[in-house]
Amino acid sequence: MDLLQQPIILVIGFALFGYLLGSVSTAIITCKIMSLPDPRTTGSNNPGATNVLRAGGKKAAIITLLGDMLKGLIPVLLATLVGMQNEVIAAAGIAAFLGHLYPVYYSFKGGKGVATILGVLLGINWIIGSGTIGIWLFVALTFRYSSLSALIAATGSPILAWLITQSPIITASVCFMAILLIWKHKRNIQNLLAGKEDKIGSKKK
């Protein structure tokens, strides 16, 4: 079935659902429920799992990580389960990712999208997602830099997407998200090059 043969309402619906779900900030909600500092006002000021780890500890960080991954996973899985084609699956994933980066509920100021893109990749294909997570974990355990782990994993994700799916649409969508993720880490890249980047678990000075 060609993309144009699918009901346009479904195409728009999945993209809108993905964006609105992606816009929900697990970090902000978790910190509020657990009476922790707003992640946007402490540490790196990023509403993501790594910053929540610094401010609130492992439990809050794990909840944030899982919540942000689910935001990417759910729209993609739903699109797959109802038989949508790769174009719609990719659109749902990109929309969820953009929702996290530019959330409508928080003045379009969001996180960097690491956990959300991992959820999207798991939804597209568990091998791609697991492989990307494996790269992230290996770099994180070796060098202890969350940002470096994200950058290297993001760089490898389009390669995995092409090797596993052989789909130009899926590969292009993953490449687009990877480029955006790397761009969102531009300050981290500067800190890494200057030797000023904080390691995982360290307290922000």
Image (cartoon, helix red, strand yellow):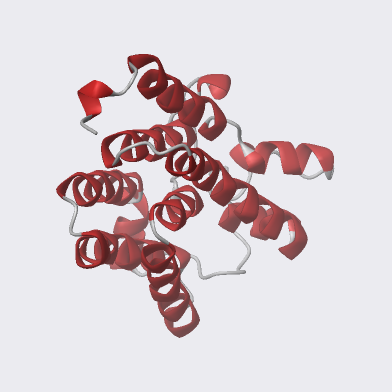
Number of marks? 0
Q: Where is residue 93 in the image (x, y as percent from the top left)?
A: 40, 40
Q: Quadrant of the C terminus?
A: bottom right
Against 44, residue 12 (above or below) is: above
Q: Residue at x 18, y 59 (%)?
A: 166
Q: Image check: 20 left or right of 138?
A: right
Q: Residue at x 44, y 63 (%)?
A: 126
Q: Residue at x 48, y 31 (%)?
A: 18
Task: Determine which quarter of the picture holds residue 86.
Answer: top left
Q: Where is residue 66 in the image (x, y as percent from the top left)?
A: 63, 54
Q: Image check: 83 left or right of 62?
A: left
Q: Which residue is drawn at 25% across and 59% down?
A: 165
The answer to whether any part of residue 43 appears in the image is yes
Task: Determine which quarter of the picture holds residue 202.
Answer: bottom right
Q: Image check: 2 left or right of 114?
A: left
Judged from this view, the residue extending furthest toward the top is: 9
Q: Image check: 1 left or right of 36?
A: left
